[in-house]
Each structure stands twice: as structure tokens, then as C-alpha cells.
Amino acid sequence: MCTQAVKRVNDTWYLMKTRDPVSWMRYEDEIALFDKPQDKYRKLIIQNPVPYEDGYYGGINDQGVAFISTFVRTSEDQVSYIRKPYIRLVLDAENVEEAIKIIQSFNPKIGGNMFVADPDKCFGLEATAREYFVEEIRDWGVKANHFIKLPDVNLNFASDPEFKEWSETHYQRASELAGDITCLDDCQRLLSDRENSEKKMAICTTPEEDKVYTYSAFIFDTKNKLVRYAQGCPSLVGFKEYSFTKLPDKKK
């Protein structure tokens, strides 16, 4: 249950996402540097803090290639993007075209709504266990937990009608905001937005409103290779900035 958007601003692409984990996902996350011999490029990834569990949630490499996604379960054999090492492998790409080739090479396919970009281009992907739909984004785009292009329906909608309303409400509200983004602060405002809070369906849901609330949010700036990261509910804790010259503190 996440909301994500992309926007072209001043020769860069901003990719932004909230993280609203469901019961089977790890709630906490952290930002970490990946700079091992197996990494073609250095990467900053938002990840599960427990190293032996699954959980890569989005990232950017030092070439300015960034990836965000949200899961859309359309079949029982659907594989989530959070499984290691999918995102880490995507970020071995030198540019967005190479990243898409890496994504399309995965077998089994990773499912869900994805955005991938470099400083020059951005693409949106919808993916099931059977197929990918890929389109270039020219100005801005929004994705939640349902498909716009593919006919497949999120299986969770049948058992939880409020989930369908939640996804459509987030999609509509983010679409109202994304086109007007002109800076990183605007991205933060979108991810912290409290419209529809009376229905407990704001883009940023607080702990007082729901058990499944917005646990974190992040923004990737592809040209400047920056990350804005809210480690916690963004409307409550705010964002901190990281880059490959301003790295997160190493774990003690």
C-alpha cells in the first residue's frame, strides 16, 4: 500500500514514494550504502534493516539511475519487487534503458507498478507474472496499488473493498499534486499530504489513524544523485538529505 509519483523538473527526474507496509512486510526501514565488489555502481537503497530478511524498497546509483515500485498482487504466483536481490540488480544499470532490460530479464517476473529513471528519461512499468507494459513518461506520472494500462485487478480488492477505494483515492490526490511540482520541497509536500485524512485515506496516514500507516517516504533526484528520506511518518518527522558525498551514518 504505497503512493508513488515522478516529475520532470530542471533537467532532472524526481521519483517519490511513501511506504505503507502491510502485515506481511517489515515495518521499519533504513537507508544504506551498497559498495561491495559485486556492485557495478555504488547504490543508496532504502532497505529492511535485518540483513538476512527480504526487503529492498527503492534506490538510486551513482550514475543517477533510480527505481521505485509498489506491489500489485494479480495472481497467486506473483513475485514482489522487495525480494532480494532484485532492486540491487536493477541498479547495476548505467542508464534507464539498461535498467529496463535488466527488469525484463528476470525470471520469474517481478510484479507491480514501477518507475525507473536516469537524469534524462523516465519510464513507467506495469507488471504481472505474465507480462510487462512499458511507457515513457514525458512530464509527470502517478501510480498506486492498481493498474491503469493492464486489465489485471489487484486480488486484494475482492476481500477488502476499502483497499480499492484507498488506492484510487491516493492515485487521484497524487495526480492533483504531481503536475505542479517545481522542487524537492514540493515532493515532500506531496508525500506528507493530509487531504482525505477524515476518511483515513490521506497520502500520509498517521499512527493515530491506522495500524497500516505511512512508515517512511523517500525522493530520488537523478541528476544531482540526491536522496530525501523520511525515516518515519513524513508529516511527523520530516526529511533528511543524503548523497554519495553525504552518506548515511554507518551502523555501529
Image (cartoon, rainbow, N blue to C red):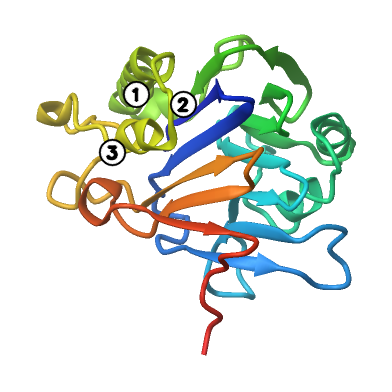
| x then y, percent, for residue 157 | 41, 24
**Mark 1: few/some/many CA within 10 Å (<14, 14-19, 20+):** many
Is there a contact, CB below 8 Å, between mark 2 and mark 1? yes
Q: Which amino acid type is shown beneath numbered disc 3?
A: Ser
Of mark 2 and mark 1, the one earlier in the sequence is 2
Secondary structure under badge 2? loop
> How many other residues sit within 10 Å of disc 3, few (<14), some (14-19) or many (≥20)?
many
Q: What residue appears at the point 64 percent right and 25 percent down from the top-left corner? A: 11
Residue at the outermost front position: 10
* Foreground: disc 3 or disc 2: 3
Q: Is residue 136 left or right of residue 228?
A: right
Q: Position of residue 21 (x, y in %)?
A: 41, 49
Corner quadrant of residue 190: top left
How far is the residue under mark 3 from the one under mark 2? 15 Å
Residue highlighted by disc 1: 170
Near-viewer residue (139 or 182)? 182
Q: Which mark is residue 208?
A: none
| SS at circle 3 | loop
The residue that mark 2 highlights is: 144
Residue that badge 3 annotates: 192
Gap in angstroms between the C-alphas marked 2 and 1: 7 Å
Of the pair 9 and 7, the residue shown nearer to us: 9
- The quarter in which the N terminus is drawn is top left
User: For the point 65% across and 39% down, which residue is it?
Assistant: 222
Between the residue at mark 3 and the residue at mark 1, the CA separation in whole angstroms equals: 12 Å
Q: Callout 2: 10 Å neighbours few (<14), some, many (20+)?
A: many
SS of the residue under disc 1: helix
The amino acid marked with disc number 1 is: His
